[in-house]
């Protein structure tokens, strides 16, 4: 096929696409856990759900109703998308009638309580592990191929962003002292890390085979500082669980190295960006006053001591504790940041050129090759 034919065909495809979505700037496919779940768990039988108020109380598109997002407003991915010009968010894969969205704004496959490893989160019952999330993407891809053909799909996917935010639950499950099932066959930290990295690498390569070229892989945040871990370990105010954060920093180093390796191995047609959420989140937690927060220790919703459940009961008395000013808290519930914290982190990830995202910033990734 000549170059001209190719462009002709491609032009037809672009015209076709622009008819479906007049003002679309990009497409993203999101994989991950509750940090980026946009409602998939609402369709599962699971203990990990954010389908009742006050979750979503600051989410404007829903008028403050819960959407399945595990925060009061937008997730980091939502904010990054909007900053780059998206006018709507990729819908959850499990929501009805979302297939067509694969051709336009993209799809969100993320699931609360899920991990890189299949077993992670089993106490919560329903969740979609990374391996199944990638399988679900294959289903979306089959749909794309039916509409655009194999070549059209490949061209289309080259420009899409594939964002992967997962691993926190694997780490939490590994470190949790309260799970007797795990302690019997508990492997060494190094071996556990190797399992996580090798399974993550396997899924990234699978996505690459399926046509993904532009990747954002988020490192793990300082989970040793989340209210749940602080409370469980009875840490004095402001302290973080050092062992946990050290484990995470080791893991993040390995992820970064693995991504460097993939950048070399896959050549310039592909790019894997590492998003250093650890440094930026820790910076916000330690210097919270500087960022305009008043509390970086307790969650806004649910109270400090476990089980720290955030919910709105049938009446005032059964309602869980909710802080007065949500914009002054770093943490929304015992596990997840507030929208206010997400906004700060998203902006740093987008534009910081001091190595928060490497080898290029996320904004540069969107413009890359397109
Ligand atoms: C798809 O691309 C391949 C390789 O670039 C080419 O050989 C083939 O003819 C193309 N198929 C169609 C239907 O255009
Ligand atoms: C994934 O992790 C499991 C342990 O949970 C391990 O046995 C397996 O070898 C890993 N698979 C890959 C592809 O690395």
Image: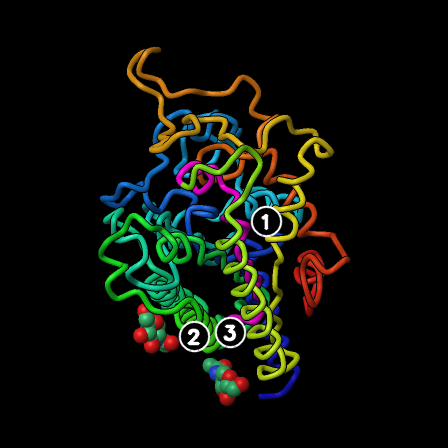
Query: Could you say where residue 265 lies in the image, as x and y percent from the top left?
Result: 58, 84
- Measured in 3D between alpha carbons, the distance from the residue under mark 2 to the one under mark 3, in whole angstroms, is 26 Å
Assess whether residue 223 is covered by the magenta stretch: yes
User: Can see residue 149?
Assistant: no
Query: Could you say where residue 84 lies in the image, as x and y percent from the top left?
Result: 66, 49
Q: In this rendered view, identify the residue nearer to me: 7 or 139.
A: 139
Residue 198's disc is 2
> What residue is pinned by disc 3?
154
Point out the residue furthest to the right here: 353
- Residue at image point 59% right, 40% down: 342
Disc on the earlier residue, 1 or 2:
1
Q: Secondary structure at mark 3?
A: helix
The quadrant holding residue 7 is: bottom right
- Measured in 3D between alpha carbons, the distance from the residue under mark 1 to the one under mark 3, in whole angstroms, is 21 Å
Query: Could you say where residue 130 lies in the image, as x and y percent from the top left?
Result: 38, 62
> What residue is pinned by disc 1?
22
Contact (Cβ within 8 Å) of mark 2 with mark 3: no
């Amino acid at each position: 096929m000549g170059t001209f034919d190719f462009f002709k065909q491609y032009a037809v495809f672009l015209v076709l696409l622009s008819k479906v979505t007049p003002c679309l700037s990009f497409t993203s496919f999101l994989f991950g856990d509750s940090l980026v779940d946009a409602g998939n768990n609402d369709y599962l039988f699971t203990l990990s759900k954010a389908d009742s108020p006050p979750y979503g109380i600051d989410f404007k598109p829903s008028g403050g109703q819960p959407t399945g997002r595990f925060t009061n407003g937008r997730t980091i991915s939502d904010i990054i998308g909007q900053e780059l010009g998206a006018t709507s968010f990729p819908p959850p894969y499990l929501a009805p009638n979302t297939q067509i969205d694969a051709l336009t704004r993209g799809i969100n496959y993320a699931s609360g309580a899920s991990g890189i490893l299949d077993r992670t989160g089993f106490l919560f019952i329903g969740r979609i592990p990374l391996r199944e999330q990638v399988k679900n993407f294959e289903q979306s891809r089959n749909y794309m191929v039916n509409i655009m053909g194999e070549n059209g799909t490949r061209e289309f996917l080259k420009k899409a962003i594939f964002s992967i935010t997962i691993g926190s639950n694997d780490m939490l499950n590994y470190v949790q002292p309260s799970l007797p099932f795990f302690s019997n066959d508990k492997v060494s930290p190094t071996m556990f890390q190797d399992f996580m990295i090798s399974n993550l690498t396997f899924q990234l390569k699978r996505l690459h085979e399926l046509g993904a070229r532009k990747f954002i892989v988020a490192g793990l945040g300082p989970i040793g500082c989340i209210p749940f871990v602080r409370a469980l370990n009875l840490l004095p105010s402001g302290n973080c669980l050092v062992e946990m954060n050290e484990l995470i920093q080791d893991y993040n180093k390995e992820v970064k190295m693995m991504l460097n390796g993939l950048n070399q191995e896959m050549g310039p047609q592909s790019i894997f960006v590492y998003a250093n959420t650890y440094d930026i989140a820790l910076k916000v937690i330690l210097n919270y006053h500087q960022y305009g927060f008043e509390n970086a220790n307790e969650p806004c919703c649910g109270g400090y001591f476990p089980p720290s459940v955030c919910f709105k009961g049938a009446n005032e008395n059964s309602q869980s504790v909710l802080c007065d000013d949500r914009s002054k808290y770093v943490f929304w519930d015992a596990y997840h940041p507030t929208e206010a914290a997400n906004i700060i982190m998203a902006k740093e990830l987008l534009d910081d050129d001091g190595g928060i995202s490497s080898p290029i910033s996320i904004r540069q990734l969107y413009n890359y090759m397109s």
